[in-house]
C-alpha cells in the first residue's frame, strides 16, 4: 500500500537515502501542506477575526473551515468543541487548568497510567499537589497491557481518568472506549491523549465517549505549532480559560469582562494561522489515504519489523508481541549496548530513530530501563526501510560484540 507516496514528501527527494523511522516524534510534511503554507503567506496573509477587507475575511473563513474539517475528522458533534492550541501538551494543560482547577478538590482522586508521556502525567501531578488531591497510577502487565483489575480498583470514586490511546513507548493500543465507560460509571471524566493514535487510525470521539481528547498537528503531516483540544461542549462551557486577552473576551469595561463564546474563549491572542491552514491540507491528505488504510499499513510494517526483530539475538522489545495490538512504533533495547550508541550508529547510515526515555520516564522505570531505542513508521515507510534498519542493527551488534 502507498507505494508512490514518498514522492509527495520533498525531504525524501532532497535526501534520497534518508530512512526516516521517527514519525512518532514528528511526521514529515507533504508538498501539498508546504504549498498551502507558502500560498497563505504569499497570497492571503492577514490576521483573522478582525479585518473587514477581502484577504482578512478569506483568512478567517479558511481558518474556520479547517475547524469544521477537524470536527468531521474526529466526529465531534459541533465545531465549538474543537479548540486550536499549540500542541498536545498545551491541550492537556488547558484541561488541567480549565476543568481541573474548577472541579478538583482536596482528597479527590486523579487516575492515570504508568505508560503516559510526561505531557499527560506532569500536569496531573502538579494539579494533585496544588489541590492536595491524590494522583493514582495504574500499572501495566509485563506485555505492556493495562492491568484491567488494577484499573477497575483504582478508578473507584475518582474525579478524572486520563490515559493515552497509544503509548509512545510500548506502542500498545489501549481500549479507550471500554476504559472511558468504566471511568464514567464512577462519575469521573475521561481525558484521552491521542497524540500517537489520531495520526494513524480512525478516531470517533462520540464512540469513545471521551470528555476531552488532545492531539498535535505536527505528528499528522501538518506544520509545527498547531495542536487540537476536543472537549464536550458542556464541559468546555464549565471550564475557564487561563490565558487572558484578545479574542477570548466578548466585553470589557473598566470594572468587568465577559468571556467570549466557544471555541474562542480558549483561543487568546493571534494564533498560528498558517499552521491551521496547513492542518486543513494534512487532514485532506490523510482522508484521501483513509485512516483505516493507514492503520493497516502501519500494522503490516510493525508485524514485519517484529518478525525480523525476533530473529535477532539480544534484542528485547517492549510492549505486545502481536502487531495487531500495536500502533506504528516499537521501542527496544540491545543487550549491553546503550540506546544512544545504537541511534548514533544508525544515524551514520542515515537511519533516523529516537533514543532515550521518550519523555516517558515512569514506564522505563517500571521495566527497569533508563533508555530504549524507538523505531516508528508512517504512511511513507515501506518494508525496505525496515530491511535497512535490520541490516544496520546487525552491524551495531557486530561492532559491540
Ligand atoms: C503520547 C504522547 N503524548 C503527548 C506528546 C506531546 O506532544 P507535543 O510535543 O506535540 O505536545 C507526545 C509526543 O511525542 C506523545 O507521544
Image (cartoon, helix red, strand yellow):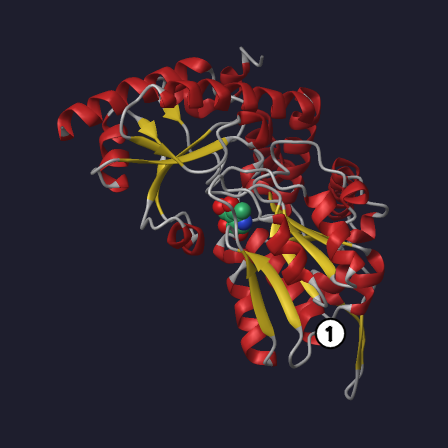
Taking the spot 53% from the left edge, 60% from the top edge, the residue there is 121
In the rendered view, tell whether residue 342 sits above or below residue 118.
Answer: above
Q: Within the image, what quadrant is residue 395 found in?
A: top left
Secondary structure at badge 1 equals helix
Q: What residue is shown with label 1? A: 103
Closest to the observer: 224 or 323?
Answer: 323
In the picture, residue 172 is in which quadrant?
top right
Of 18 and 208, which appears nearest the observer? 208
- Residue 188, image x, y percentages: 74, 63
Q: Quadrant of the C terminus?
A: top left
Whether residue 245 appears in this view of the structure is: no
**Residue 290 spot, x, y in % from top left:** 69, 23
Residue 196 in picture, x, y percent from top left: 56, 40
* Mark 1 CB within 8 Å of ligand 1: no
Whether residue 138 sits left or right of residue 343 in the image: it is right
In what quadrant of the picture does the N terminus appear? top right
Instruction: Establish if 188 lies above or below 209.
Output: below
Could you say where residue 51 lies in the image, as x and y percent from the top left? Answer: 75, 54
The vertical placement of 255 against 137, above or below, is below
Q: Residue at x 54, y 41 (%)?
A: 218
Residue 116 seen anywhere in this rendered image of the structure: yes
Q: Residues within 10 Å of mark 1 (few under 14, many from 20)?
A: few
Total numbered labels: 1
Which residue corresponds to the image point at 70% horizontal and 49% vertical from the top-left? 179
Viewer-closest of 67 and 306? 306
Q: Is residue 224 left or right of residue 209?
A: left
Q: Is residue 312 above or below residue 137?
A: above
Q: Residue at x 77, y 62 (%)?
A: 186
In the drawing, does residue 341 fall left or right of residue 181? left
Amino acid at each position: 500500500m502507498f507505494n508512490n507516496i514518498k514522492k509527495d514528501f520533498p525531504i525524501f527527494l532532497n535526501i534520497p537515502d534518508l530512512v526516516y523511522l521517527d514519525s512518532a516524534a514528528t511526521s514529515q510534511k507533504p508538498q501539498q501542506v508546504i504549498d498551502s503554507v507558502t500560498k497563505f503567506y504569499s497570497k492571503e496573509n492577514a490576521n483573522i477575526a478582525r479585518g473587514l477587507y477581502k484577504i482578512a475575511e478569506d483568512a478567517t473563513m479558511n481558518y474556520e473551515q479547517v475547524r469544521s474539517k477537524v470536527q468531521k475528522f474526529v466526529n465531534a458533534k459541533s465545531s465549538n468543541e474543537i479548540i486550536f492550541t499549540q500542541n498536545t501538551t498545551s491541550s492537556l494543560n488547558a484541561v488541567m487548568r480549565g476543568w481541573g482547577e474548577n472541579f478538583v478538590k482536596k482528597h479527590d482522586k486523579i487516575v492515570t497510567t504508568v505508560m503516559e508521556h510526561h505531557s499527560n502525567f506532569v500536569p496531573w501531578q502538579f494539579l494533585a499537589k496544588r489541590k492536595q488531591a491524590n494522583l493514582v497510577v495504574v500499572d501495566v502487565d509485563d506485555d505492556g497491557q493495562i492491568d484491567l483489575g488494577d484499573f477497575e480498583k483504582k478508578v473507584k470514586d475518582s474525579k478524572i481518568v486520563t490515559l493515552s490511546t497509544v503509548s509512545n513507548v510500548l506502542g500498545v493500543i489501549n481500549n479507550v472506549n471500554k476504559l472511558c465507560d468504566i471511568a464514567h460509571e464512577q462519575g469521573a471524566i475521561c481525558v484521552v491523549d491521542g497524540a500517537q493514535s489520531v495520526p494513524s487510525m480512525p478516531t470517533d470521539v462520540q464512540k469513545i465517549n471521551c470528555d476531552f481528547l488532545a492531539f498535535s498537528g505536527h505528528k499528522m503531516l501538518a506544520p509545527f505549532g498547531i495542536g487540537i483540544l476536543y472537549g464536550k461542549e458542556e464541559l468546555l462551557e464549565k471550564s475557564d480559560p487561563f490565558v487572558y486577552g484578545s479574542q477570548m473576551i466578548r466585553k470589557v469595561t473598566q470594572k468587568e469582562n465577559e468571556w467570549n463564546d466557544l471555541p474562542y474563549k480558549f483561543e487568546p491572542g493571534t494564533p498560528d494561522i498558517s499552521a491551521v491552514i496547513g492542518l486543513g491540507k494534512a487532514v485532506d491528505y490523510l482522508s484521501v489515504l483513509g485512516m483505516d488504510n493507514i492503520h493497516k499499513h502501519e500494522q503490516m510494517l510493525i508485524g514485519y519489523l517484529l518478525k525480523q526483530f525476533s530473529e535477532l539475538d539480544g534484542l528485547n522489545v517492549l510492549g505486545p508481541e502481536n502487531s495487531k495490538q500495536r500502533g506504528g512504533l516499537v521501542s527496544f533495547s540491545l543487550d549491553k549496548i546503550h540506546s544512544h550508541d545504537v541511534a548514533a550508529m544508525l544515524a551514520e547510515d542515515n537511519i533516523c530513530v529516537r533514543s532515550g526515555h521518550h519523555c516517558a520516564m515512569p514506564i522505563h522505570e517500571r521495566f527497569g530501563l533508563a533508555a530504549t531505542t524507538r523505531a516508528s513508521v508512517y504512511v511513507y515507510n515501506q518494508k525496505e526501510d525496515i530491511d535497512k534498519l535490520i541490516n544496520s542493527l546487525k552491524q551495531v551488534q557486530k561492532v559491540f560484540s
